[in-house]
Image: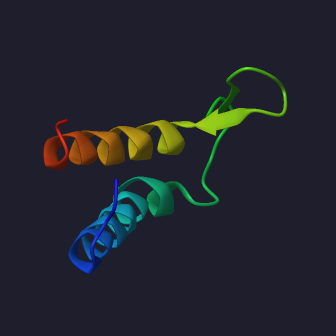
Amino acid sequence: MTFDDRAIDWLAELLAEAARAEIMPRFRKLGEGDVRQKTSAADLVTEADVNAERLITGRLRERYPD
């Protein structure tokens, strides 16, 4: 898959939106239980990570359904 400048700009805005909506509101505000292990002690994930991934994945699937 190749991306033209418009697609790259769209993707950059999508990533910025995910950061604004999901990552930055939680920055330095994680409490106990907000971080969990995925596959090992070195593989950590937060609710912000999960929500940002959902937002990004959903929008990518809308734009590129195939």
The quadrant the C terminus occupies is top left
Residue at left offset 52%, top offset 43%: 49
The residue at the far front in this view is 1
Q: Is residue 54 left or right of residue 4?
A: right
The x and y percentages for residue 16 are: 38, 69
The x and y percentages for residue 15 are: 38, 63
Residue at left offset 73%, top offset 20%: 39
Residue at left offset 36%, top offset 71%: 12
Up the image or down, 32 lies above or below 38; here it is below
How many marks the image carries: the answer is 0
Residue 46: which quarter of the image?
top right
Residue 2: which quarter of the image?
bottom left
Up the image or down, 32 lies above or below 17; here it is above
Up the image or down, 29 lies above or below 36; here it is below
The x and y percentages for residue 14 are: 30, 62
Q: Nearer the viewer, residue 29 or 19?
A: 19
Q: Is residue 26 left or right of residue 9?
A: right
The x and y percentages for residue 58 are: 25, 40
Q: Nearer the viewer, residue 26 or 13?
A: 13
